[in-house]
Image (cartoon, coloured by chain):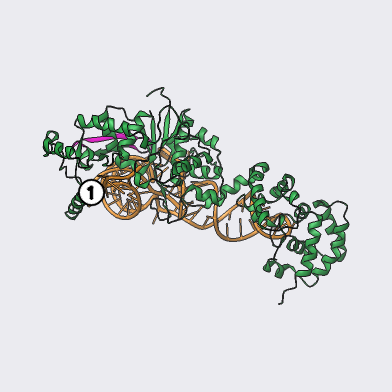
Amino acid sequence: MVGKRVRTRFAPSPTGYLHVGGLRTALYNYLFAKRMGGDFIVRIEDTDQSRKVADAQENLIKTLEWAGLMPDESPLHGGDFGPYLQSERLDIYKKYCEQLLEEGHAYHCFATSEELEENRQLQMKQGLQPKYNRKWLPEDMGGSMPRSEIQKKLDEGVPSVVRMKVPDYVSVWFEDIIRGPIEFDSATIDDQVLMKSDGFPTYHFASVIDDHLMEFTHIIRGEEWLPSMPKHLLLYEFLGWEPPKYAHLPLLLNPDRSKLSKRQGDVSVEDYIRKGYSSETIVNFVALLGWNQGEGCEQEVYSLQELIERFSLERVGKAGSIFTIDKLNWLEKQYIKTRPAEDIIRVIQPLLISELEKKETLLDRVTITGERYLEDVIELMRERVGFEHEFVTFSSYFFFEPEEYEEEAVKKRWTPDTSSLLGEFLPVLESMPDFTAEAIEVALKEFVAPKGLKTAILIHPLRICSSGVSFGPSLYHMLEVLGREAVVRRIQKGMAVITVPQQ
RNA sequence: GGCGUGUUCGUCUAGUGGCCCAGGACGUCGCCCUCUCACGGCGAAGAUCACGGGUUCGAAUCCCGUACACGCUACCA
């Protein structure tokens, strides 16, 4: 084991979209591999034909890449240990199945599903542990079925499965990287099906064989696999292979502490992408759900690179964590605050252009879709939005005329004198040599001072006229970005349309 | 039912025998900043460390029980 190149895997089944829990598992595998200078591989576990979903594997891998977790090997990227699709490895499983059959570690079973189900019900009713009754265990393996009978069924072509013969009273022990030593008694484990009647292997069989053949050094997976460890370890023993190291991750939970699932909110990474969360945010957030740097470290914001540098399996917690989005939202804001404007422009420019196709604007399209203008808007708004798309939606007045005026704001800030004051101030704005924030501020102060009024008397109405809402960036800067023409037009419109509310 | 794992503020967590009548972050609330909203700053509330026994001069930390939760118990992964 010493000196061996670290290889880890993420092995999802293609039954839908990438689950946030799956993303975390993939991330920890990726971080650990990269930390150790090793490889991260994606293998697709498509051994259940009935649950297979078209395009799922492409989606899975594409989402992983979106998150920045580039596989070194995968069905899409190739590699020296392929195929990476289990459905393309059937002959391999068959070969090892034959071997186990010959060596007396596995046997054919012809029991039907109905028969097994009946058996289970009966055992449950008697308060016994539901377990296969070993009806088809051959005589020479300690069972009661004559070989001739088995051969007869085989010759007749009766559908069958292959089960592993679990030794009766053996204790199976291993050391989990996260949880420490764990021991199981083989008496509590069933004779697990290895090969299904459709010729496909079960998860347990296929994953053990592939994990060995693909030379993985560390298996990092969800806690739900912990109870099947003895089966896997026994298989390694039967096959004469040395098992890899194991780390079983704590589960991600719903608010009611059950295993994170649909029905209680969004669980697919795509859902969060659609809402506008960035990959940095999701990766950062999910990384902290179960792992922390420790040693009194109080850092909350980590880049992927930093995570690679600091990650260790020893610092993964044992208890499951509830997935709540409060901190996720906060993190997104942190990233928006520091993200380079050009990166944000790349995202919002197409968004804006498609909005402009749907809606008229009186502003100059070339200007407002230009980088200069967008950058100005971004710098004014970056501390006020929760998502990148809000640069367009939350501050739409930078791109479209206000269609209505916030009722509460008008009620609070519009007095009977407002319109005439605005009318008086308008020529000042129109005649200013430079329409800059500084100049507007000075002009407003000089306009208002002789009257013995405060700037607020006009600041709020100006904001309402030009944005339609009561909140937003510094008024002076906002007016400068909007430009004189738009501002004058909007004030005139406001004066005409807004009336003093009835008391 | 059996087996396995887990249990520190609402949430994510720090803590590996004395520095902890428990620290940070999110969220909540208050104050300051201020043209609004945010940002930022300051502060507050919030955990009898699941419970009960030990061990020890001393335990959130070690041991043993109990409770509760979750996972698994398929020809699903």
Disc 1 target residue: A113
Residue A337, compared with residue B30, is above or below; it is above
From the top left corner, tell me how far across and down residue A20 is, in percent: 46, 46
Q: Where the N terminus of chain A falls, by quadrant?
A: top left
Q: Is residue A290 visible from the viewing direction of this image?
A: no
Q: What stretch is highlighted in magenta?
A: A164-180
- Give the quarter of the image for residue A205: top left
Residue at x 34% of width, y 29% of height: A212
Which residue lies most toward the top here?
A3
Q: Does the magenta stretch include residue A175?
A: yes
Residue A347, compared with residue B30, is above or below; it is above
- Give the quarter of the image for residue A372: top right
Q: Where the C terminus of chain A falls, by quadrant?
A: bottom right
Chain letter matching colour green: A
Find chain B in the image and tell me its colour.
orange
Q: Does the magenta stretch include residue A187?
A: no
Residue at x 68% of width, y 59% of height: A471
From the top left corner, tell me how far across and down residue A461 is, in percent: 76, 64
From the top left corner, tell me how far across and down residue B2 is, in percent: 23, 47
Residue A400, compared with residue A51, is above or below; it is below
Q: What residue type is labelled 1?
A: Ser
